[in-house]
């Protein structure tokens, strides 16, 4: 059984270079999406972490290099800091990095990497302070970042795929 790369129909008898639409092809009449992200990165962002994984971690949205460099690619969507918080210039980068690292954990990419949740939360705190956040507010955000233990557990998805007609 072969799947035609031109029309995606199993056992289509048309040549691959022949433009056609199979009569059996029925596109799914649904829209799949995720809801909840409020920020979209407009340019690639390079950030030097205070730690490094044991091996390079490569995805289509971000790379975490064993040199300690994190690169997040333009188009990455994230929800920012959670809790009773407010967004400003002192927490955008920290929230971005924290969300990327937690996502890597949910994807199972941090297993055996040497990176764990306390390290992720500490990095969040370091970035908050380095961006000028008041120490008391940074402590409050840092303590809040440890509340949801499952945020970096493999398989957890805070924004499951939704389906609309």
Image (cartoon, rainbow, N blue to C red):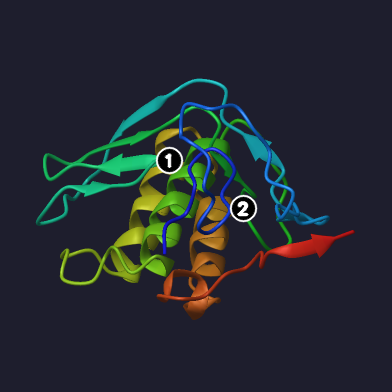
> Quadrant of the image for the N terminus?
bottom left
Residue for point 43% across, 68% down: 106
Q: In the depicted view, which residue is nearer to us: 79 or 31? A: 31
164 up-or-down from 134: above or below? below
In-image side of 97 versus 25 (left or right): left
Q: Secondary structure at mark 1?
A: loop
What is the residue that sits farthest to the top in this orientation?
43
Residue for point 34% across, 46% down: 59
Residue for point 11% across, 39% down: 67
Q: In the depicted view, which residue is nearer to us: 54 or 134? A: 54
> Quadrant of the image for the C terminus?
bottom right
Residue 133 percent location from the top left of the image: 53, 40
Residue 40 percent location from the top left of the image: 63, 34
Q: In the depicted view, which residue is nearer to us: 149 or 13? A: 13
Q: Are marks 2 and 1 in contact (CB under 8 Å)?
A: no
Residue holding disc 1: 61
Crowdedness near tag 1: few (<14), some (14–19) or many (≥20) residues, C-alpha within 10 Å: some
Q: CA distance from mark 2 to mark 1?
A: 19 Å
Residue 10 percent location from the top left of the image: 53, 59
Q: Earlier in the sequence, mark 2 or mark 1?
A: 1
Which mark is drawn over residue 165? none
In-image side of 157 versus 54 (left or right): right
Residue 112 percent location from the top left of the image: 15, 71
Residue holding disc 2: 81
161 up-or-down from 44: above or below? below
Residue for point 54% across, 38% down: 6
Q: Secondary structure at mark 2?
A: loop
What is the residue that sits farthest to the right in this orientation?
165
What is the residue that sits farthest to the front in this orientation?
13
């Amino acid at each position: 059984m072969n799947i035609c790369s031109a029309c995606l129909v199993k056992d289509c008898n048309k040549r691959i270079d022949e433009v056609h639409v199979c009569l059996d092809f029925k596109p799914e009449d649904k829209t799949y999406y995720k809801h909840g992200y409020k920020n979209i990165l407009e340019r690639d962002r390079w950030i030097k972490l205070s730690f490094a994984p044991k091996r390079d971690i490569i995805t289509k949205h971000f790379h975490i290099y064993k040199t300690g460099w994190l690169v997040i690619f333009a188009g990455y969507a994230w929800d920012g800091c959670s809790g009773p918080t407010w967004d400003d210039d002192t927490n955008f980068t920290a929230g971005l990095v924290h969300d990327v690292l937690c996502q890597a954990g949910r994807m199972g990419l941090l297993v055996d990497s040497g990176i764990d949740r306390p390290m992720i939360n500490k990095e969040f705190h370091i970035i908050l302070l380095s961006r000028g956040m008041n120490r008391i507010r940074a402590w409050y955000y840092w303590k809040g970042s440890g509340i949801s233990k499952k945020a970096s557990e493999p398989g957890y998805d805070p924004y499951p795929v939704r389906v609309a007609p």
